[in-house]
């Protein structure tokens, strides 16, 4: 583990908000354990182990029914820890893999049977090397026949340059963490409005209204992020999903309390109908449909 790496919260609070039955934590990760599933040599950070057993324990403690486990960059394109967790969870989990251009149809088929339903393209420059866009388009062509979708991770300043590429992708697209807006600029700033307009103009683009702990400047309970999530949930109720981001890789400012994160949900999805869409209907349609 890196010297400055913050391990996940050892004792999160019990949420006040009672999750509806069947709720899905649609963005979380598993790390290692490193002695079984080594971290990738090309990784940009080394986390603490966060194995599947800990994730499933948290799922039950918080009141979620299912997980969507996303391959993180510390494991690179070695999806064994992810697939192992999916097989252990049975129908209670689905996955998002990270793959290279040499992925074969047989390998995609094998991951599909294990519960993988998409791939993640990471454009956050501090986390990954610069892969040519043609490589991503080639992968997209391979996975679309399996009905998989593409999760994209980028930061707000990069959206303008990425938009033409996103419009070329032939699948459903899910954008991580609201496109990582600068919350100090407010929801009316052109940067965030560019993201809102992207969703408005492209019915195949969804977003995760996740990670207030990453976007905040004020800190917990993340008041400065509420308006961003609320705008997206209310404008695009059938194209939003939510997740804890456990075990919160690469957090530098503080260790998030997962119970407090669950209590953030009704602040951005204030009605039962919006909560049901966000936590059950949308992720079930996308990952289990």
Image (tube, rainbow, N blue to C red):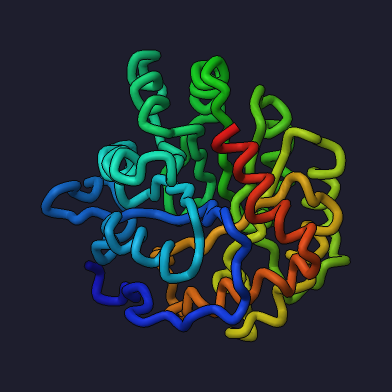
Which quadrant holds residue 269? bottom right
Which one is in front, 234 or 158? 234
Q: How many marks?
A: 0
Image height of 159 relative to 260, above or below? above
Which one is in front, 132 or 102? 102
Quadrant, the C terminus: top right
Residue 98 in sight from this viewpoint = yes
Q: Position of residue 94 (x, y in %)?
A: 45, 41
- At horizontal 34% and vertical 22% (from top left) the residue drawn is 110
Q: Relative to residue 281, is residue 104 drawn left or right?
A: left
Image height of 223 relative to 88, above or below? below
Which quadrant holds residue 216? bottom right
Q: Position of residue 170 (x, y in %)?
A: 66, 22
Residue 134 in sight from this viewpoint = no
Q: Position of residue 248 (x, y in %)?
A: 43, 66
Which one is in front, 151 or 100? 151
- At horizontal 85% and vertical 47% (from top left) the residue drawn is 197
Q: Please identify the residue farthest to the left as the structure is shown.
A: 35
- At horizontal 73% and vertical 30% (from top left) the residue drawn is 167
Quadrant, the N terminus: bottom left
Which quadrant holds residue 47? bottom left
Q: Relative to residue 248, is residue 40 drawn left or right?
A: left
- At horizontal 49% and vertical 23% (from top left) the residue drawn is 139
């Amino acid at each position: 583990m890196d010297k400055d790496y913050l391990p996940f919260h050892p004792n999160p609070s019990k949420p006040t908000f009672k999750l509806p039955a069947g709720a899905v934590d649609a963005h979380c990760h598993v790390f290692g354990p490193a002695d079984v599933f080594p971290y990738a040599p090309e990784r940009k950070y080394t986390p603490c182990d966060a194995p599947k057993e800990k994730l499933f324990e948290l799922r039950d403690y918080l009141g979620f029914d299912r997980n969507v486990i996303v391959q993180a960059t510390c494991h690179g394109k070695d999806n064994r820890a992810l697939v192992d967790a999916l097989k252990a969870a049975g129908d209670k989990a689905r996955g998002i893999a990270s793959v290279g251009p040499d992925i074969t149809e047989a390998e995609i088929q094998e991951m599909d049977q294990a519960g993988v339903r998409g791939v993640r393209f990471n454009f956050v420059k501090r986390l990954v090397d610069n892969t040519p866009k043609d490589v991503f388009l080639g992968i997209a062509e391979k996975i679309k026949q399996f009905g998989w979708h593409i999760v994209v991770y980028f930061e707000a300043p990069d959206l303008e340059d990425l938009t033409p590429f996103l419009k070329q992708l032939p699948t459903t697209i899910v954008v991580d963490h609201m496109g990582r807006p600068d919350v100090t600029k407010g929801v009316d700033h052109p940067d965030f409005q560019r993201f809102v307009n992207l969703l408005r103009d492209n019915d195949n683009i969804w977003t995760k209204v996740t990670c207030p702990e990453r976007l905040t400047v004020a800190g917990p309970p993340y008041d400065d992020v509420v308006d961003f999530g609320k705008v997206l949930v209310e404008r695009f109720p059938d194209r939003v999903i939510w997740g804890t981001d456990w075990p919160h890789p690469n957090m530098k400012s503080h260790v998030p309390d997962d119970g407090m994160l669950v209590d953030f949900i009704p602040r951005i999805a204030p009605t039962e109908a919006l909560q049901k869409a966000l936590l059950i209907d949308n992720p079930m349609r996308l990952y289990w449909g």
